Image: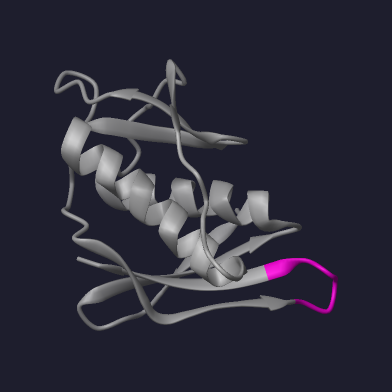
Amino acid sequence: MPYRFLSHTADAAVVLEAPDEAGLRAAGVAALRELLLGDSPVAVALERPIRASGNDTAERLINYLREVLYLYDAERFVPAEAAAEGVRGEPFQADRHRAIREVKAVTYHGAEVRRGADGGLRATVVFDL
């Protein structure tokens, strides 16, 4: 599994592991989807563009995940997976998706990306619940 949740007070902290920045985005989408919907199935039906902006890998990752969360909150677009130019998923469907918690924000608190001994990337991200 490319992510694991850490014990955290009122938030959800997650460690993402991937060989590259695109992999971190993919792991971040998977973690966010689990927080929002648990194990509800999500189809890869549509793609929404997202530009991952920022001065470094951590900032780009946080900004990307913030945009994914915005699409969920504003358009009820459920993320299935990261895409090269955005995120793929489908509109929320009450008969297929079960919203299990609200994620208020993706925070910069404690956000960091480090290169591991194996050359891959390891990021810590905190979601405000």
Residue 87 screen position, x and y as percent: 47, 35
Rendering quarter of residue 102: bottom left
Task: Please tell me which residue lies in front, 103 or 107.
Answer: 107
48 lies above or below 13: above
> Which residue corresponds to the image point at 25% horizontal and 63% vertical from the top-left?
105
The residue lying at 73 percent from left, 57 percent from top is: 20
Rendered location of residue 42, percent (x, y): 38, 26
| Residue 64 visible in this rendered orientation of the protein | yes
Q: Indicate yes or no whether the magenta region holds residue 124.
A: no
50 vs 5, nearest the viewer: 50
Residue span colored magenta: 116-121
| Image quadrant where residue 46 sits | top left
Rendering coords of residue 14 (x, y %): 45, 69
Q: Quadrant of the C terminus?
A: bottom left
* In the image, farthest residue toward the right: 118
> On screen, 90 above or below 73?
above
Left-right relation of 45 to 121: left
Residue 38 in the figure: left or right of residue 93 = right
Q: Is residue 103 left or right of residue 18?
A: left
Overall secondary structure of the magenta stretch?
loop
Query: Horizontal and vertical percent for residue 48?
Result: 42, 28
In the picture provided, is 10 more to the left or to the right than 35? left
